[in-house]
Image: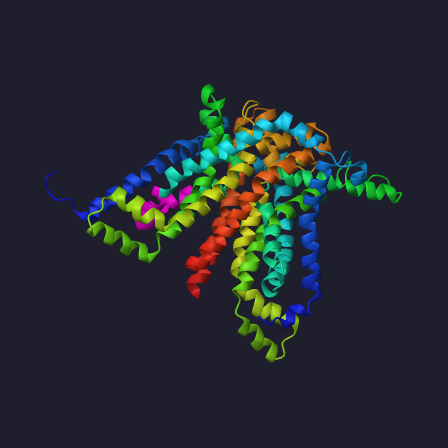
Amino acid sequence: MTAPPNPTSRASQIRMLCVLPAVIFFTAFWLLPAATLIALPANNGWDTYLLVLTNARYLQSLLNTLWLSLATTLVTLILGAAVGIYLARRRFRGRQALISLLTAPLAFPGVIVGFFVILIGGRQGSFASLTSSLGMGRMTFAYGVIGLFLAYLYFSLPRAIASYTAAAEAMDPQLEEAARVLGASRWQITRDAWWPQLLPTTVACGAIVFATAMGAFGTAFTLSSQFEVVPITIYNEFTNYANFAVAASLSIALGLVTWGVLYLSRVLTNDAKAAQ
Amino acid sequence: MRTSSTSRSPLLFLTTVAICIFMVAPVLVSVMAGLVNSYNRGISSGLTLRWVEQVWEVYGSTVGASIGLALACVICTLLLGVPCAYALARSRSRLARAFEELLLLPVAIPSLATALALILVYGNMTSLRQSFVFILIGHVVFTLPFMVRTVSAAFQRPDLLAMEEAARTLGAGFVQRFLGVLVPAVLPAIVAGMLMVFTLSIGEFNLTWMLHIPLTRTLPVGLADSYASMRIEVGSAYTLVFLLVILPVLWILQALTTLIQKRYGT
């Protein structure tokens, strides 16, 4: 005790003290609950873990969600890249304000996005008024897969626009200039000069958009869609049927998919960085 | 920068215009719907504030609750996150990297799963379940990684190491060094983290919907309730209230991010 403290071990003690509150909090309120959740389906037998694959209804819900999230990701990346490239290369008055406006919906809860779709494509929506004035009756698109897709697109696009704008601003203009001097067509420039430089953003942003779409709950909840997605299935099992083990099993499956995709994208983008 | 190829690209221009309309039009329609007498008849039905007043009467308490909750969440993530960010930035051990990875999990998996897990373990503790603290715990779990990562990146600046060392040789104790030298040096990052946590907490629905009870309603929970049970004008007016709460915070966050980029170049 009387010996002068070694500065290195003293520093590491201080670091321990600094990280301790966060470790305790995280262990008590995430690690322990998550372990409980993971262990729960075992009470109903081991095959409960595989329900999402063996039960036709849950499998359908999973396929719905995968399909919808994949379509959302593809369209979001294409449109987000187009808008991002345009905004990165043009300078005009109010450009910064426009970027702020386009990325603000990132902070909207999913329920608001669902409401927007109802407002436009629901029973009292402006689309219904339009079609009825054209003599086609009050048409709606809010409560099916189209409404869900548009809503998912709405909350995914801001992220893609922000990422691609930043990435396109950092692109090397000389590559493109060289390609143009060599007589490359616009398609060739896109493929050979733009695409490789935007690839890391595409992988990273695509993974986040896909994972967010897979886990989105508020939007589908507001639309009470006829097209069932896994988060809604989990919610129904838990709240309406008190099927805790099933809800836990489906949550694990969904969590594995979203975590796996995000992990894969990080490995891929880190490899790309290391290879450069 | 000269941009000959994009200025000749009508496809990019038209896509951008279409996406701008797609993103902005619903917000404008919603604001309009919250301020007119009848959404069906539009502006011609006359402007009114009665839907906003009705929202204030029925859901007014959720505004204060959400702001209070978000502020509490900011304070908790500050107290837990800033020292943790320091330790993780200075440590190269495997354990530290592993904890950093674990901290990210609540963001990588759907928050619905986190909410179920919390209910499974703590749902039976009635006094906790019936208070806002239960929702607060969920929000802190979800927002902590954002604070830790933002601040930890700032702590890694090499000049900070030298500053800390200088303060130490001058005889400053750790608390003095931490509060007097380190925290002021990363203050912009801390403020950015605080605003990020605030916006995330104020807009959080997926966790909150599972964790709330009728006595602990937040703004997004109230929104979902109004969309399901009130007329469309009331839902729109309520959405307008949400926008008025969230937009100033977003603008400050944006200005601050630009400031940090200008000052530190990252």
Q: Nearer the viewer, residue A256 or A127?
A: A127
Whether residue B125 appears in this view of the structure is no
Q: Nearer the viewer, residue A122 or B34?
A: B34
Quarter of the image where one finds residue A182: bottom right
Residue at the spot x=24%, y=42% of the render? A13
Whether residue A156 appears in this view of the structure is yes
Residue lying at the far right of the rendered structure:
A135
Query: Which quadrant would the C terminus of chain B be assigned to in this image?
Result: bottom left
Q: Position of residue B195 (x, y in %)?
A: 48, 43
Q: Main secondary structure of the magenta part?
A: helix
Q: Nearer the viewer, residue A62 or B26?
A: B26
Point out the stretch of residues depicted in magenta.
B83-104
Query: Which quadrant would the N terminus of chain B be assigned to in this image?
Result: bottom right
Drawn side of residue A128 relative to residue B172, left or right: right
Q: Is residue A254 magenta?
A: no
Q: Is residue B92 magenta?
A: yes
Q: Is residue B85 above or below residue A268?
A: above
Residue at the spot x=54%, y=49% of the render? A208
Residue at the spot x=58%, y=46% of the render? A106
